[in-house]
């Protein structure tokens, strides 16, 4: 028996068991201490890495979030961390979305926030670490809701009786194409009178829906369906409604009001103002357009009749030139002549002679375009000859051919020892191309063997016995190609001979006068002379000695080598201008890069002569340039293209007359016009009727104005005031248009004006400082007197020397309209005529405060554009003033005037910073339009009753991420 | 039986066993530590390689530069595709639809990491 308590086997088992327990315990401790603990740390770090990767991808996707599309981005993650596989996904806890990561056994878990991204994206999905690929898939589908916009012009309409039917005199023109809908839209327009029409957006962008309104004679009428405010005057307001529906069935509506009346006096001109945004609902990141639209409302009818007094400066400086027109307005015209061109060959000749000429005696050269030129032989200018040797460039044939029987004019060219080879000839016709004008052309090429000269000198006397006449004769043979005849004459006094005039008439053998002039010296060169006896007839008013010299150039064996008969055409630039009134001065200048001739065909005379510019026909005291149409014909004199421009000048007083008469032509039958002209003193022209509706009478007075004297602006305004004080036609708008080209330098007491201004000027005008200051004060006081009587004063500064400061102070507008040329002057008078008749409001200030948190896109211009849909006048761009205020960015536009048919619009592109259901697009109470409504006669800008304030409607934008923006983790 | 006594083991079996155990633990820890070092690499890489600017450029061409772009649409899109291909990407900007007051544009981008498609409206 073993005395041990346990056997060795049992002891071994017990020890092994205890040790196993110990090892197990130690292993667990070590595992927990080293493996699990470390794995946990690593898991947390790796989970953070994966979550950060997902998060950064989300942020990146958000940064480039598509409006309508998808983004797929790959996610990389370890398949196992430690020995753990795991899941990654999005989880929502307490309305917050987290990225969660969890080991597959669930013992490790991590949540990472995604900030506010879940507000703009729906985050969903999960992935398992053992999956083959992982990724984020962002999808967004959106649809821009339609925005309806309806415009109507004119928005005020007049009922007129048309065959016992009361119908609007014009159509209301509805524009719907400002509306916006994705994929186009269908529309229905209810006119407000019970009638409606419909269609689709295929009518855009130019589609306009027109509609006449009736008072009560049709089922669709204003009296039954609109808001009638005055039945007797048929005054009512109709609301027109536009509804648009897009391809998905979403719709939007817009309304406008239209005013009707049969009594134009019942509706004052005013402004229609609106503000809208496109689109009204947008996706985050999309630009949004804010539109501000202003339309002048009113009726062009009798209550807009005018009483206008022209005050025209006729001081001495109005004699100066001013530009009347320029052609072209900018840059240059160009013209290329028609060129006749041939060639011939020369081989070992002693000399050649080339003649280009016409025998045209009746139609073009002699009787039409060269009939009044300086001398008959100048008609040779109609043919221009250019010759080119084999090795040189073209040279001009300058020798003139002229003979009368048979008639022959042209040019010739001769060359001794000509170069062998091909020679070229160019001929151009220098005459206007009118009605296809052309002439016959003949070109001869001769050769000759040699050239000799023969000289004759002689002296004779003009004596009383033969009446101070003497006929010298000489013979020209057929081989004489050219002769030169010169004569010098002298009178005898105290034993000395002094040069003195004689008259020479040179006749050819057919007794045609070739030359005629009176001078001390005469030189005549005759090319291609007719053979026979020539006669030089000398005469004088006293005793003379005459020395003559005759040289004959003889070409031996002149033989014709080549001959062409053809027709020569021309190419001229033809244009016209019109002088509406007789003018003191007319000057035509040009700038060009080559020579040309110009024909001017005036309205009364028919000189048809050619000029090299500048042309000038001027007088300080009489209107020597008759009114009417002046035609220009401009022809190059060299065979090259020329670039040129032409400027026409008239006297300033001529330009003023033209502008004022043009203004009168724009006046209606009910408009009154008067005329004050001034220089050292002012005069009321047409004195019998200060203001008259007979514009012809006023125009006659305007045409009779003549320049001269100083500039008494004060007296001119005093006379204008006298006209209105005498009689101002009722229900008319009184206005003065004061034009001046200089400074106020006169307040002469002899004019009979106020005595207060004569202390320095006295009886004289002048440029002394004291006189100038008194003259200015005189003018300002007279202007104030007119303004206080509600007379609107427009001022025009004509030319560079006008006193813009003084004229600006005189003006009701606060500035002087500048006219540098007669063209400007006419344009400004036209603008004033339109403005006086048509303005709906003046001094319009549009203020729009874009709230903080909205970025304005300044990449494009945000100027307000004002245009008249009827095409009257030029469009004007009003520049924006930008300033920062506590409420936001203030955008402001200042418009001096808006006419009743004018429309002004500006588009501002903005990007809101954040999303929202109703983001206001402007700040209430500070976004408005202030203006002086018609008749805008109040003069105190601080008077609140002077101005009308229209609060711009606040438009709200729904700015969101779209209806279906999701990110799925896969 | 004496040979079976653990207490009397003097040939190092226990040491060997414990050494193996400790080695295993240390090796596991080394692997974990290596993984630990790698943590953050993926998120950094993702931040760097995401082609935000390339996609923004395409969108800008499609939106801001649109008026000029439309005129030369065909040629320019080919040039854009070639330019992006040089960098190993695909990128294009195309007009897919036109109304009287807007264009509908499609921007596409693709590389090994990201695919992007967007169709948006640009007002005329």
Image (cartoon, coloured by chain):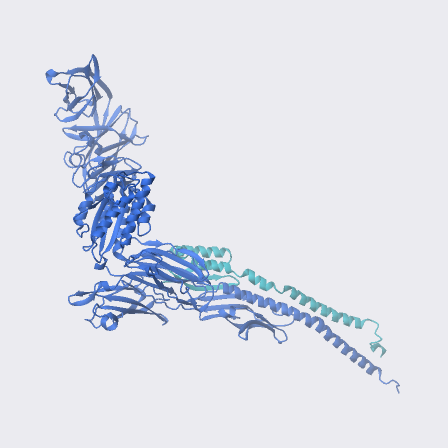
Query: Quick one: A263 or A290, which is closer to the camera?
Result: A263
Q: Is residue A864 left or right of residue A209?
A: right
Can residue A713 be seen here? The reply is: no
Expressed as whole percent of the image width and height from the top left, the position of residue A150 reads: 32, 65
Expressed as whole percent of the image width and height from the top left, the position of residue A680 reads: 25, 40
Query: Quick one: A398 or A707, which is closer to the camera?
Result: A707
Q: Could you tell me which quadrant the N terminus of chain A lies in? A: bottom right
Q: Is residue A10 left or right of residue A105?
A: right
Query: Quick one: B37 or A257, which is closer to the camera?
Result: A257
Can residue A466 be seen here? The reply is: yes
Measuring 17% from the left and 68% from the top, which residue is drawn there? A165
Q: Name above or below for residue A819 compared with residue A393.
A: below
Residue positioned most to the top = A495
The chain in cyan = B
Q: Name above or below for residue A669 compared with residue A644.
A: below
Q: Name above or below for residue B32 compared with residue A420.
A: below
Residue positioned most to the bottom = A1
Q: Residue A31 appears in which quarter of the rendering?
A: bottom right
Query: Quick one: A347 or A96, which is closer to the camera?
Result: A96
Expressed as whole percent of the image width and height from the top left, the position of residue A863 reads: 37, 56
Q: How many marks?
A: 0
Q: Name above or below for residue A897 compared with residue A161.
A: above
Q: Residue A158 appears in which quarter of the rendering?
A: bottom left
Expressed as whole percent of the image width and height from the top left, the position of residue A488 reads: 20, 19
Q: Colour of chain A?
A: blue
């Amino acid at each position: 028996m073993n005395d041990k308590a346990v056997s060795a086997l049992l002891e071994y088992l017990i020890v092994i068991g205890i040790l196993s327990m110990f090892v197990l315990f130690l292993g667990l401790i070590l595992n927990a201490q080293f493996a699990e603990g470390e794995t946990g740390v690593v898991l947390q770090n790796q989970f953070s890495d994966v979550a950060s990767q997902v998060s950064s991808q989300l942020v990146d996707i958000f940064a480039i979030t598509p409006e309508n599309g998808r983004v797929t981005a790959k996610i990389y993650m370890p398949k196992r961390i430690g020995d753990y596989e795991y899941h990654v996904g999005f989880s929502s806890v307490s309305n917050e979305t987290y990225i969660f990561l969890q080991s597959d056994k669930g013992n490790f878990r991590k949540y990472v926030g995604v900030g506010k991204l879940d507000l703009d994206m729906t985050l969903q999905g999960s992935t398992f670490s053992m999956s083959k690929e992982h990724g984020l898939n962002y999808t967004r589908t959106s649809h821009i809701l339609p925005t309806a916009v309806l415009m109507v012009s004119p928005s005020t309409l007049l009922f007129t009786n048309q065959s016992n039917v009361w119908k609007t005199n014009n159509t209301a023109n509805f524009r719907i194409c400002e509306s916006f809908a994705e994929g186009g839209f269908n529309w229905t327009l209810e006119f407000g009178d019970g009638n409606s029409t419909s269609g689709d957006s295929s009518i855009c962008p130019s589609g306009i829906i027109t509609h006449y309104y009736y008072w009560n004679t049709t089922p669709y009428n204003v009296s039954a369906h609109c808001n009638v405010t005055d039945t007797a005057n048929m005054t009512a307001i109709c609301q027109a409604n536009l509804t648009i529906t897009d391809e998905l069935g979403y719709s939007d509506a817009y309304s406008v009001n239209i005013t009707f009346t049969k009594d134009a006096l019942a509706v004052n001109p005013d402004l229609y103002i609106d503000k809208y945004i496109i689109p009204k609902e947008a996706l985050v990141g999309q630009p949004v357009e804010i539109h501000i639209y202003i339309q002048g409302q009113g009726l062009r009818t009798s209550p807009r009749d005018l009483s206008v007094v022209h005050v025209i400066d006729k001081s001495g400086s109005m004699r100066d030139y001013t530009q009347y027109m320029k052609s072209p307005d900018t840059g240059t015209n160009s013209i290329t002549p028609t060129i006749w061109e041939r060639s011939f060959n020369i081989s070992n000749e002693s000399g050649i002679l080339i003649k280009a000429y016409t025998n045209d005696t009746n139609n073009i050269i002699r009787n039409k375009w060269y009939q009044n030129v300086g001398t008959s032989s100048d008609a040779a200018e109609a043919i221009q000859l250019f010759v080119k040797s084999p090795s040189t460039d073209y040279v001009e044939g300058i020798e003139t051919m002229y003979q009368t029987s048979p008639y022959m004019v042209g040019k010739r060219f001769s060359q001794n020892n000509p170069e062998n080879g091909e020679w070229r000839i160019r001929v151009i016709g220098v005459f206007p191309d009118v009605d296809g004008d052309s002439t016959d052309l003949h070109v001869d090429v001769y050769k000759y063997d040699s050239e000799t000269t023969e000289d004759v000198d002689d002296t004779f006397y003009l004596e009383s016995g033969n009446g101070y006449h003497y006929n010298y004769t000489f013979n020209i043979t057929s081989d004489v190609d050219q002769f030169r005849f010169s004569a010098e004459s002298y009178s005898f006094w105290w034993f000395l001979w002094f040069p003195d005039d004689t008259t020479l008439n040179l006749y050819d053998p057919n007794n045609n006068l070739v030359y005629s002039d009176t001078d001390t010296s005469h030189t005549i060169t005759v090319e291609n002379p007719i053979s026979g006896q020539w006669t030089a007839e000398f005469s004088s008013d006293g005793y003379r000695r005459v020395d003559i010299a005759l040289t004959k150039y003889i070409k031996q064996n002149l033989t014709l080598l080549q001959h062409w008969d053809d027709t020569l055409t021309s190419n001229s630039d033809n244009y016209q201008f019109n002088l509406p009134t007789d003018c003191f001065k007319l000057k035509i200048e040009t700038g060009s890069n080559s020579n040309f001739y110009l024909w001017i065909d005036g309205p009364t005379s028919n000189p048809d002569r050619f000029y090299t510019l500048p042309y000038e026909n001027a007088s300080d005291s009489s209107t020597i340039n008759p009114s009417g149409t002046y035609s220009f014909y401009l022809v190059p004199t060299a065979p090259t293209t020329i670039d040129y421009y032409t400027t026409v000048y008239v006297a300033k007083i001529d330009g003023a007359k033209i502008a004022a008469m043009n203004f009168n032509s724009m006046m209606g039958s009910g408009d009154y016009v008067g005329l004050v002209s001034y220089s050292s003193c002012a005069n009321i022209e047409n004195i019998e009727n200060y203001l008259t509706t007979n514009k012809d009478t006023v125009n006659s007075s305007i045409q009779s104005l003549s320049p001269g004297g100083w500039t008494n602006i004060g007296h001119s305004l005093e006379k204008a005031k006298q006209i209105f004080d005498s009689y101002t036609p009722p229900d008319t708008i009184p206005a003065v248009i004061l034009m001046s080209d200089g400074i106020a330098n006169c307040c002469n007491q002899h004019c009979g004006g106020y005595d207060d201004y004569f202390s320095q000027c006295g009886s004289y005008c002048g440029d002394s400082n004291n006189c100038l200051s008194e003259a200015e004060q005189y003018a300002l006081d007279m202007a104030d007197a007119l303004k206080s009587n509600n007379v609107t004063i427009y001022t025009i500064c004509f030319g560079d020397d006008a006193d813009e400061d003084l004229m600006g102070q005189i003006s009701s507008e606060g500035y002087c309209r500048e006219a540098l040329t007669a063209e400007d002057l006419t344009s400004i008078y036209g603008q004033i005529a339109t403005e006086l008749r048509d303005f709906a409001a003046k001094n319009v200030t549009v203020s729009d405060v874009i709230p903080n948190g909205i970025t304005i896109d300044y990449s494009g211009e945000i100027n307000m554009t004002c245009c008249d849909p009827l095409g009257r006048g030029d469009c004007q761009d009003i520049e924006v003033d930008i300033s920062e205020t506590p409420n936001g960015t203030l955008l402001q536009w200042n418009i001096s005037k808006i006419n009743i048919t004018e429309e002004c619009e500006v588009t501002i592109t903005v990007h809101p910073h954040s999303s929202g259901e109703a983001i206001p697009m402007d700040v209430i109470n500070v976004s408005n339009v202030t203006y002086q409504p018609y008749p805008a006669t109040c003069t105190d800008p601080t008077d609140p009753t002077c101005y009308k304030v229209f609060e711009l409607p606040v438009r709200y934008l729904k700015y969101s991420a779209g209806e279906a923006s999701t990110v799925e983790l896969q | 039986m004496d040979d079976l006594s653990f207490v009397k083991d003097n040939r190092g079996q226990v040491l060997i066993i414990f050494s193996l155990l400790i080695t295993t633990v240390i090796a596991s820890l080394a692997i974990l530590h290596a993984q630990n070092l790698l943590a953050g690499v993926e998120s950094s890489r993702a931040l760097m390689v995401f082609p935000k600017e390339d996609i923004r450029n395409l969108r800008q061409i499609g939106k801001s530069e649109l008026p000029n772009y439309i005129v030369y649409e065909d040629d320019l899109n080919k040039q854009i595709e070639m330019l992006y291909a040089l960098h190993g990407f695909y990128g294009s900007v195309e007009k897919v639809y036109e109304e009287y007051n807007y264009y509908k544009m499609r921007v596409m981008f693709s590389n090994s990491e990201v695919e992007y498609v967007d169709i948006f409206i640009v007002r005329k």
